[in-house]
Structure formats: C-alpha cells, structure tokens
Image (cartoon, rainbow, N blue to C red):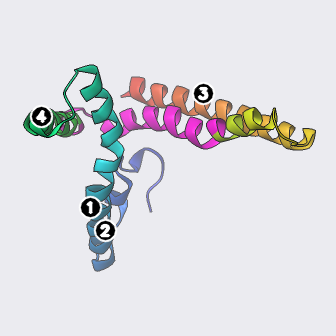
C-alpha cells in the first residue's frame, strides 16, 4: 500500500502487476480512445471558427490537417511536460468543480426567478454554489502549491 509522496501521479501505476490490472489498463485505453474525440471536438470547433476555416466539403483537408496538428500538439504537451498530472490537477480543480457544483445550481437559481421554487430550495442551491467555489479555490491553491514544490 502506498501513501503520501510515494503515490505515483498516474494512479493506475500504483497497482501491482496482475491480469486484472492489465485488463483495467486495457479498458482505460479503450475509454480514452473513445472519449478524447468527444472532449477535444468543442475546442477544435472554436479554433476552426477563430481561424475562419471553411466548413464545407471542399475544405475537408485543411480542417483535417488542423485537427491532426492539434491532436499531435496535445500528445506532445502530455509527453514532454514533467509532472503533467499536476497540470491536469489545476484544470480539474478549476473546471470540474465549477461544472459539477457551481453551474448547475446557478442554472436552477436563474430558472427559479421565473418559477415557483421555495426559499429553502434556493438556499440549498446557494449552499452548493458556495461549497463549489470553496472547493474550486482550495483545489486550485493546492495544485499550485504542489507545482511550486516540484
């Protein structure tokens, strides 16, 4: 069992070698193979729109070349940045906590202005929002502290 600083940044590397671990790693690879396009597609769309890449049949090759370059750049960054897991901690701390704890309750609060939500439900939403912002700040500060320590 590992604890503290002896824990590997890539959690799955902390597991002992066995058939189950190999199966888990294979399933993780399949998962990443199918989820990476879903995650990167919105960024590709924004970059293509910013660069005014046409979105018609004739411009398939320029779009594909741009997308290939962005995927290669992503792989290059992931491979060459030391302690990449620490960098992803910042993005997870900022993005995931906001997406999970702040945005949904804010939408409910916004919708409650025009509907009949009770004050108790609104106070619960604001409590979740405050928790989410607090978790975002704590996780981001902790991630920055870990990066500065390395």
Q: Look at the image and say whether residue 143 sits in the magenta stretch.
A: no
Residue 86 sits in quarter: top left
Image: 60 above or below 133: below
The numbered mark, 1 or 4, whose residue comes first in the sequence reads: 1
Instruction: Determine whether the residue tagged by mark 2 lies in a helix, strand or loop.
Output: helix
Residue 24 location in percent, x, y?
33, 70
Give SS at disc 3: helix
Q: Give me the C-alpha separation between circle 1 and circle 4.
A: 31 Å
Point out residue 75 in the picture as x, y percentages from the top left corner. 19, 40
**Residue at 24% from the left image edge and 38% from the top image edge:** 78
Task: State the residue in front, 102 or 25.
Answer: 102
Instruction: Please name the residue that numbered disc 4 is placed on.
Output: 59
Instruction: Look at the numbered discs 3 and 4 and tell me whether their residues touch, using CB distance below 8 Å.
Output: no
Q: Residue at label 1? A: 29
Which numbered disc, 3 or 4, marks the residue that appears first in the sequence?
A: 4
* The label number, if any, that marks residue 5 in the structure image: none
Residue at the spot of label 2? 27
- Residue 137's tag is 3
In the picture, measured across the screen, residue 119 lies left or right of residue 71, that is right
- Camera-near label (1 vs 4) is 4
- Residue at point 19% right, 26% down? 53
């Amino acid at each position: 069992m590992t604890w503290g600083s002896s824990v590997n940044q890539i959690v799955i590397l902390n597991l002992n070698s066995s058939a189950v671990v190999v199966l888990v790693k294979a399933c993780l690879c399949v998962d990443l193979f199918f989820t990476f396009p879903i995650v990167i597609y919105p960024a590709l769309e924004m970059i293509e729109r910013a660069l005014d890449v046409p979105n018609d049949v004739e411009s398939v090759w320029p779009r594909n070349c741009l997308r290939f370059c962005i995927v290669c750049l992503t792989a290059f960054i992931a491979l060459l940045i030391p302690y990449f897991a620490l960098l992803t901690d910042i993005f997870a701390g900022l993005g995931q906590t906001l997406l999970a704890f702040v945005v949904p309750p804010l939408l409910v609060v916004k919708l409650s202005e025009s509907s009949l939500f009770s004050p108790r439900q609104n106070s619960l939403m604001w409590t979740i929002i405050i928790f989410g912002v607090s978790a975002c700040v704590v996780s981001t500060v902790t991630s920055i502290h870990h990066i500065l320590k390395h």
